[in-house]
Amino acid sequence: MAISTDKEGAVLRTSRELGVRFKLISDVERRIINLFGVLHPTEGIARPATFIIDKRGLIRYRYIGKDYSDRPPITGLLQALTWL
């Protein structure tokens, strides 16, 4: 699942254009983004973040980037997935 501050129409277009097979959610009011603590303090958009949440709803992995180019290392993601 991915969450964006873009309006629903833009999220749907992006999903179609990219052929995304997972759910994209529009969060223009930034409720979910605030709950997860990823709102950029000055830009008003979400910082890039990755969460792995297990079937019980427990966060097993969290990576919150400092800016748009800061992404989690693939090794950390793969290791977190093996813990599930």
Image (cartoon, helix red, strand yellow):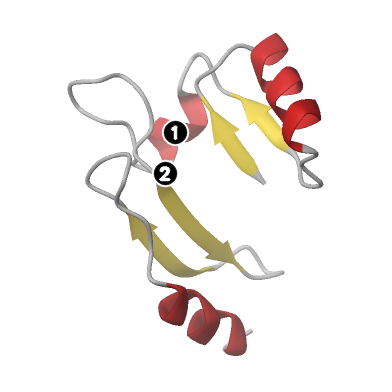
The image shows residue 50 at horizontal and vertical percentages of 47, 56
> Number of marks in the image?
2
Residue lying furthest left: 42
Q: Name the residue under label 1.
A: 33
Secondary-structure class at tag 1: helix
Q: Name the residue under label 2.
A: 36
Q: What residue type is labelled 2?
A: Phe
Left or right of 1 on screen, residue 20: right
Answer whether labels 2 and 1 touch (C-beta < 8 Å).
Answer: yes
Q: 60 above or below 41?
A: below
Q: Where is residue 43 in the image (x, y as percent from the top left)?
A: 25, 20
Query: Nearest the camera: 27 or 48?
Result: 48
At label 2, counting other C-alpha atoms closer than 10 Å, the crowd grade (few under 14, some 14-19, many 20 or more) is few
- Mark 1 belongs to which amino acid? Ile
Q: At x 50% / y 59%, what residue is drawn?
A: 51
Tell me the quarter of the picture where residue 55 sits.
Answer: bottom right
